[in-house]
Image: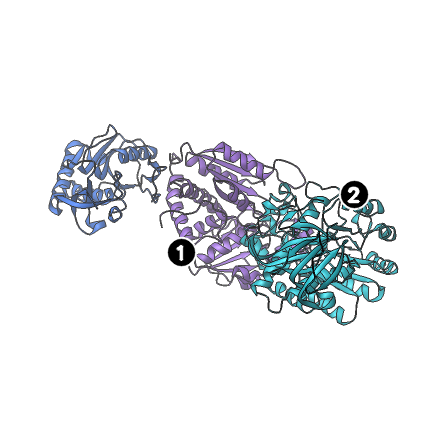
Amino acid sequence: MQTLRRKDILGLEEMSAEEITLILETARSMREIIQRKIKKVPTLRGRTVLNLFYEPSTRTKASFELAQKYMSADSVSVAGTSSSLVKGETLKDTVRNVEVMGIECVIMRHPVSGSANYLARNVEASVINAGDGMHEHPTQGLLDMFTILDKKGRLEELKVVIVGDIRHSRVARSNMWGLQKMGAEVVVSGPPTLMPPDLEAFGVKYCPDLEEAVEEADVVMALRLQKERQEGGLFPTLREYAEIYGLTSRSVVKAKDDLLIMHPGPINRGVEISSELADSPRSVVLEQVTGGVAVRMALLYLLMGGVKEE
Amino acid sequence: MPGTLPPSARQDMEGGEKMALTHKATVMDEKGIMQALRRIAHEIIEHNKKIDDVVLVGIRSRGVPLAKRLQEYLNEIEGSAIPLGILDITLYRDDLTERQEQPEVHITDVPFELDKKHVILVDDVLYTGRTIRAAMDALIDLGRPATIQLAVLTDRGHRELPIRADYVGKNVPTSRSERVEVKLKEIDGSDQVDILEQTKD
Amino acid sequence: MKTILIKGGRLIDPSRNFDGRADLLIKDGVIEGMKNGLKAPSGSETIDAQNLVVMPGLIDMHVHLRDPGYEYKEDIITGSRAAAAGGFTAVATMANTDPVGDDPTTICYIRERAGSAAVRIYPLGALTKGLEGKELAELGRMKSAGAVAFSDDGKPVFNGMIMRNALQYAAGLGALIIAHEEDPYLAAKGTMHEGSVSSVLGLRGIPSAAEEAMLARDLMLLETSGGRLHIAHVSTAGSVELIRRAKAEGLKVTAEVTPHHLILTDRAVKNSGYNTNTKVNPPLRAESDRQALWAGLLDGTIDVIASDHAPHHSDDKDVEFDFAPFGIAGLETTLPLMLDEYSSGRIKDLTLPILVDKMSTAPARILGLEGGTLQEGGAADITIVDPDRSFIINPETWHSKSRNTPFAGRQLNGAAVFTIVGGKVVMREGVITDQ
């Protein structure tokens, strides 16, 4: 397959292994550009991209903006406010503006699940979901897979453990779909109150005992824990969480020796992961950042590089 | 069927969707290709006094095996290994918004500094010159060579940009409706250069 | 007023267990006679009902007409025209308006507006002041003003003591309470049914227990408080079972179900790509719930089919999923959807007399309204249906002000062709005939 035959990147659930492979392979070529002294190719000269962020983001937004600059696209970034209480411009009206401005690709982050689908349905421009509520964060999933592939040389038959607040995590959802499509085994761990109802829907295995979950694991990924979840009564204290579900050199003792340690950031050190582990050579938290730019360049090229199918 | 052409043949299709391509003439065979490349190797040495500063860069995809062969011939003559790089020009193309099929991006692999080097850019067919324009842009993004020289196996004319080759294996006069098809052992299993012409289906 | 002879139709009257061919004569707003071979008196209109089904006027006991306060979504007049188009001769409208229908003034306002409406409009009063669940509203004074039952619908009565007192107090008035069963803490911020689909979509779920826990509480309260309780929009298998057991124990409880809960499941949210027209409360549940609702409807556990017509303007609905209000506008789709379920044969044991009972006779009995029967001398509220009429749901042609339906584009068999209220034809072949 040479071309991504779709207008939008909304989630990995709807993508095939072939599509994911194409994106990851293209990203490998893109990474060479990032390693150059002059990090710029003229591919998307004169093409316009809009970054629409309805939720604060540092790394995802910076990563997309760098990808756009490296590809020579013209880009505009808008920080939106979105709330049912604060009456601002509605997404519907924003969409109409996008159409008039001749924007060809919209990158959107939004606190409400399904908003990227809503936008994609209403604009001709390509839409890349940069995270919608608790639904998906496909570019994060892709960059995590890119990093694992780079370090391990394959995704098939790897055991990947995702630990923490699966229930509220769009990163976990994208990773669960993507990794399994690429042939990896995914095990999730964390307190039952932070698991989505009917977890079987994702086809993953649940193992509440962290030590047991990481047995013979190739990769372990810790998710960021939102403090608000404690107030919601989903777990008693951060201290207890860290003790039972925090990644430490002790809790991953049964994993493979070449275990990769990942975290989508920003890290709560000493909560979901110990500093010792986050800074160890097994941690690829920083490689994840470079991979992110390459993956996003690949997506911009694949969505905007060719002529749109009618 | 145009679809049977190797996907990497970078010559533009001049309309002709409903035309069939048929063999018109074979202009180079295995021996002819070898002789042409050997001659080019000698010309490169002649032209570049300090061969230590020369590097080869093949344009994907058929420029790459051609550059490798030149590297071998130069090695045979000079006894020193000339560095070889691979250039993917996809991201520098000027026709991305016009093509139906999106070209696949491959890795550019130039594992040495280009600054102050004499770069021999290698490709199979020189036609409109647009590929070479893209390749020069790509090279300049990688560094600042002392010179860029162009070596091609065939030159079929019909330039659209002010570009010429420094080393030509064979000049192949063609009409625009014809195609020049280069086959190389490394990719296609045999060495041969054919002219194909369009005939009504 | 014209005399009307409805000739040769299949008459269904569950109130008398009648299902057969007969002519029906309407005179002076009442049903004058029902037998074969009636002659049309001079100057009368004759409706040829050879291939049609004639039934007592349908009653939708659960609608939101949004009037007063939200007339941009719907008002009493447009809502009544939508009802007439959908084959209903009467509707009962909920009190979650602005101001809330929690005092006789608002009840009187609705009754007054109802005078210009196409069908009969029965106001339902709020159970507690401002629908706040804290203090009882003036149930007695509202009843005198014309409220036919009481409900905080849209919101649960969370305080158990208030609900207990309401049931006891209403029993003294002989008034019916309609309960919206939902534990607000269990339902917290949920936007769809909690289950595998909500997990995949990343939407907060409303667990079945949110409905069942409140329902179980209210059934326990009903055991000792006396009075009558009607359960609005039952949506889960567990609720059906709770009601089935309560009825077996002799509790005075009745229940209703909506067409969307009978036909759609939570998968509709996913299949429609987060279409906010699938966002409704209670939410579209799982397939096992849907099947249990049909079983409950057919075995008599569920008495009534009601639309829960909840019209919303596209400005409100055409937004991100979390921000959209709950609700489906159903007045113009309820009857065709149910007729299609019947004619398609998808539901074994579903008959037209069952549908007429659930949509006319039962709601009349539960609310104590006239109608629900073709008995001579009764008000001539009649719905005439063409069970073979094939059409596609197109909200653009609706009489309602709103368009929010997940059923747009569905091809259905069966629709009302005449709606007659008090002897007057108010809808003929989809056209509302203004008086």
Q: Which chain is cyan?
A: C
The kind of residue tagged 2 is Pro
Q: Quadrant of residue C240?
A: bottom right
Chain for mark 1?
A
Q: Which chain is purple?
A: A
The kind of residue tagged 1 is Arg
Q: Secondary structure at mark 1?
A: loop
Chain for mark 2?
C
Q: How is the image coloured?
A: by chain
Circles 1, 2 touching at the beta carbon (< 8 Å): no
Instruction: Identify the residue at the far front of this view.
Output: C42
Marks 1 and 2 belong to one chain:
no
Q: Nearer the viewer, residue B170 or C287?
A: C287
State the image coordinates of residue C194 (x, y, percent, origin top left). Answer: 63, 58
Cα gap from disc 1 to disc 2, whole angstroms: 64 Å
- The 10 Å Cα crowd at callout 1, few under 14, some 14 to 19, many 20 or more, is some
Q: Nearer the viewer, residue B184 or B115?
A: B184
Q: Which residue is mark 2?
A: C99
Q: Which residue is mark 1?
A: A154
- The colour one sees for chain B in the rendered image is blue
Q: Quadrant of the C terminus of chain C?
A: top right
Residue A258 visible at all? no
Q: Secondary structure at mark 2?
A: loop
State the image coordinates of residue B1 (x, y, percent, origin top left). Answer: 24, 48
State the image coordinates of residue C35 (x, y, percent, origin top left). Answer: 71, 65
Nearer to us of marks 1 and 2 is: 2
Instruction: Identify the residue at the far top of this view.
Output: B162
